Amino acid sequence: MITNRFEEWKERQRLMGVQQGRLDGERTLVLRQIQHRFGELPAALRLRLEGASQAELESLADRVLDASSLDDLFQ
């Protein structure tokens, strides 16, 4: 019983690590896209990006293609 619970916990921890790694990778890619398009990101917007959820990052990744400015992108 204890062994099964430990294995379940270990698998949940592994999956959480995988999810966090994906989120970190997506955040890095979106940051690169923004910097390539608009230059260095101001500190306040960088902090906002660092706290963004996966859904927010996906939205930013789509909008960076059409945005004409950082203000337009982060509205």
Image (tube, helix red, strand yellow):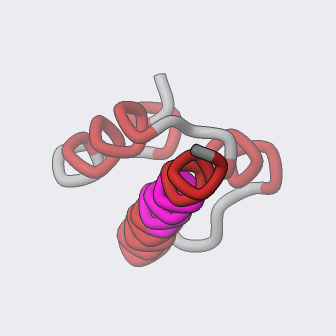
> x, y percentage for residue 13?
58, 57
The residue range painted magenta reads 10-21
Residue at the image point whose x is 59% and y is 50% from the top: 9
Q: In the rendered view, tell whether residue 15 sits above or below residue 67.
A: below
Left or right: 69 in relation to 4: left
Residue 57 occupies quadrant: top left
Q: In the rendered view, tell whether residue 12 sits above or below residue 37.
A: above
Residue 63 occupies quadrant: top left
Residue 68 occupies quadrant: top left
Q: Specify the principal SS of the magenta part.
A: helix
User: Which residue, as the protein is rendered here, is positioned at the far front?
Assistant: 1
Residue at the image point whose x is 47% and y is 22% from the top: 75
- Can residue 75 be seen here? The reply is yes
Q: Nearer the viewer, residue 32 or 52?
A: 52
Residue at the image point whose x is 18% and y is 45% from the top: 66
> x, y percentage for residue 38?
46, 64
Residue at the image point whose x is 41% and y is 41% from the top: 54
Magenta includes 37?
no
Q: Nearer the viewer, residue 10 or 21?
A: 10
> x, y percentage for residue 43?
81, 55
- Can residue 34 be seen here? The reply is no
Q: In the rendered view, tell whether residue 5 sits above or below residue 17.
A: above
> x, y percentage for residue 42?
74, 56
